[in-house]
Amino acid sequence: MTSSIQRGNDEWLGALTSSGDLREAALADLRVILVGGLRRGLAAWVEAGSPQLEALAEETSQEALIRILDRLDTFEGRSRFTTWAYKVAFRIALTDLRRKQWQNVSLDQMLESGADEGREMAVVDPRIGPEAAVERRDMLDQITRILQEELTARQMGMMEAVVLRGIPMEAIAQKMGVERNALYKMMHDARLKLKRRLAREGLDLADVMATFEQGNASPGRVVKGEGG
Amino acid sequence: MLRFVDRLLGWLAGGRRLSFAVSPAYLSVLEREITSTQEIEYGCDDVYRLLDQFAEAVLRGEDAAPWMPLIRAHLERCPDCRAEFEALMRVLQGQES
């Protein structure tokens, strides 16, 4: 790293908004900083030293420079300028990686639900008696009914895809043609709706889970009475 | 933005109702998701706006800003934003050492 790269925030902003050699030097320095940062930061996702990582770092740095210049007015100076610039670059690089990783998987495949897998095995557990099995089934049916009334299969599929199968929200959002932020907010609304409904029904999912884990079905511990 | 939201709402609303029965394994996931759901949560855009400040604060061992718990909660839930945070921290920690 050369001394010319060591700039304060004001110096970065001054140079990048200037013209001529000063601006060109700042852009060249920033590109070097970004390429180095991308190599280090992306090593958890792409093999360190691989041609793929080198290409990704080079391509991303170019795109990041354009975006950084375009959005300089959004830099509030509350962090180091280079930290802000890294943030911009990583958003670009990781979005690109996710897009490539999931490009051959359809939205339907992503949202395919396996929510009922293992249900019978748990309900018909040989270690518990038939009465307990009936109680377990009743609990699951009650929760299923609430889910059916409150959520669509797509909402449930998205929750399962992200949480259970680790599919990036960005990948799902891209397939749907929406922003990741909009998708997150929709899922938050769905979770809130479900949480409020469960509260109204007096159902505590942690208690339901404990019943299954202990092999001791007792609906009295689960239903806490009607809420408002 | 409104167009995106309208599209998304329409798509979600058009989904068929659930036809599956909930399994205990799925219940476990649901329980974690619902228990950790808060009335007010930061979205991905909120987190992105503050991620650089947050990463530097974490590096300094600071935890005083009122918005930091909201960011932490989002990062625990959103694998996409968490990946961006982890990449950023790798670089910043490399600079410190």
Image (tube, rainbow, N blue to C red):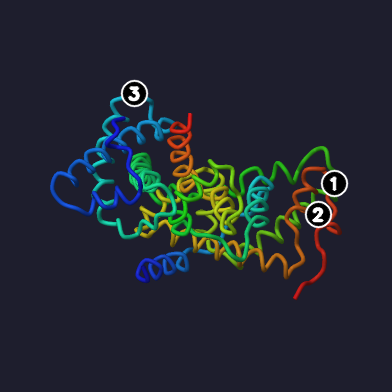
Give the labeled residue for mark 2. Answer: A135
Q: In this view, does B92 lie to the left or right of A3?
A: right
10 Å neighbourhood of mark 3: few (<14), some, or many (≥20)? few
List the single residue furthest toward the left.
Answer: A20
Label pair 2/3, CB-CB below 8 angstroms: no
- Viewer-nearest residue: A139 or A23: A23
| Of the image marks 2 and 1, the number of the one nearer the N terminus | 2
User: Disc 2: which chain?
Assistant: A
Q: Is mark 1 on a helix, strand or loop?
A: loop
| Of the image marks 3 and 1, the number of the one nearer the N terminus | 3
Give the labeled residue for mark 3. Answer: A49
Residues marked 2 and 3, same chain: yes
Please provide percent x and percent y for residue A106: 38, 48
Q: How far apart are marks 2 and 3 (CA)?
A: 57 Å
Please provide percent x and percent y for residue A216: 85, 46
Residues marked 3 and 1, same chain: yes
Give the labeled residue for mark 1. Answer: A216
In the rendered view, tell whether residue B4 sits above or below residue B53.
below
Query: Please, what is the three-letter code of the amino acid marked with disc 2?
Result: Glu
Please provide percent x and percent y for residue A202: 77, 66
- Viewer-nearest residue: B72 or A140: B72
Total numbered badges shown on the rendered structure:
3
Residue at the spot 36% in from the left edge and 44% down from the top edge: A82
